[in-house]
Image (tube, helix red, strand yellow):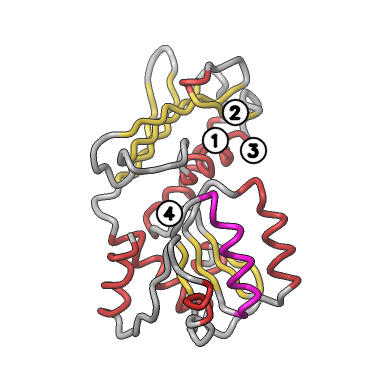
Amino acid sequence: MGKTIEQIAIDKGHSVGPILDRNSSDSAWTTIQSADVVIEFTAPASALENYERLLKLGVPIVTGTTGWYDQIDLVKEMVAKHNGSFFWASNFSIGVNLFWEINQRLAALMSKHPSYAASMTEIHHTQKLDEPSGTAITTAEQITNVHPNYRSWKLTSEGVDQGDLPIDAQREGDVKGTHIVRFDSNVDQIELSHKAKSRDGFALGAILAAEFLSSKKGFYTMSDMLRL
């Protein structure tokens, strides 16, 4: 993802500064203070530490790291404390965000038809660390927020109880990201899906978010950028 973001940024006329990873020294971090924005795609275990360091340096952050959303209130406090600029998305794809708009409308409609049982499948490459994906969690929460049959989501591998929206998380090869929502009855099935063909859509969305965040303060999401 980092290499794809770098190439698209250059193609759009931006310059790319230092690229940091888990082995970067403390002195290397200070070199990014002059950056207009930092795009952060790392891992859940390091995300909050990265946000804190970058906010202290006064650098705007666009993050695509997932798996930290249970700490979102803490991150909002960090952003407010440092008067920072922060943009997060569980998925930067424009197509996925349109998929979510449709999913919310479908979930609201299906909430009035409890004879249809809801379920989800998400498929990603074998190197993806979090399970289910952040995209799947957002999709599931859109359903559980409005559907009376479901109080929460749960991975099928962990055993599903009544009231749980089941998510089947699969890891296969180099799959870029597939998300499927199903409503199944005794007589038919309704299915909504999004399949990413490459990482370019995610990378482009991150660059657009970086452009959007320029000269802004506060905590932002894709809905702010797309005005959905």
Q: Amino acid at mark 3?
A: Asn
| Residue 216, percent from left and from top | 60, 81
Dot 3 falls on a residue whose secondary structure is: loop
Q: Between marks 1 and 2, how big is the CA–CA gap?
A: 6 Å
Residue at image mark 3: 145
Which of the two discs, 2 and 4, sits closer to the camera?
A: 4
Rendered residue at 27%/42% (across/down): 175
Q: Between marks 2 and 4, how big is the CA–CA gap?
A: 23 Å
Crowding near the residue tagged with mark 3, few <14, some 14–19, many ≥20 C-alpha atoms within 10 Å = some
Q: Residue furthest top?
A: 186
Q: Between marks 4 and 3, how big is the CA–CA gap?
A: 18 Å
Q: Between marks 3 and 2, how big is the CA–CA gap?
A: 13 Å
Which of the two discs, 3 and 2, sits closer to the camera?
A: 3
Rendered residue at 50%/24% (across/down): 166
Q: Is residue 77 left or right of residue 213?
A: right
Identify the mark at residue 98; answer none if there is no mark. 4
Residue at image mark 1: 109
Residue at image mark 2: 112
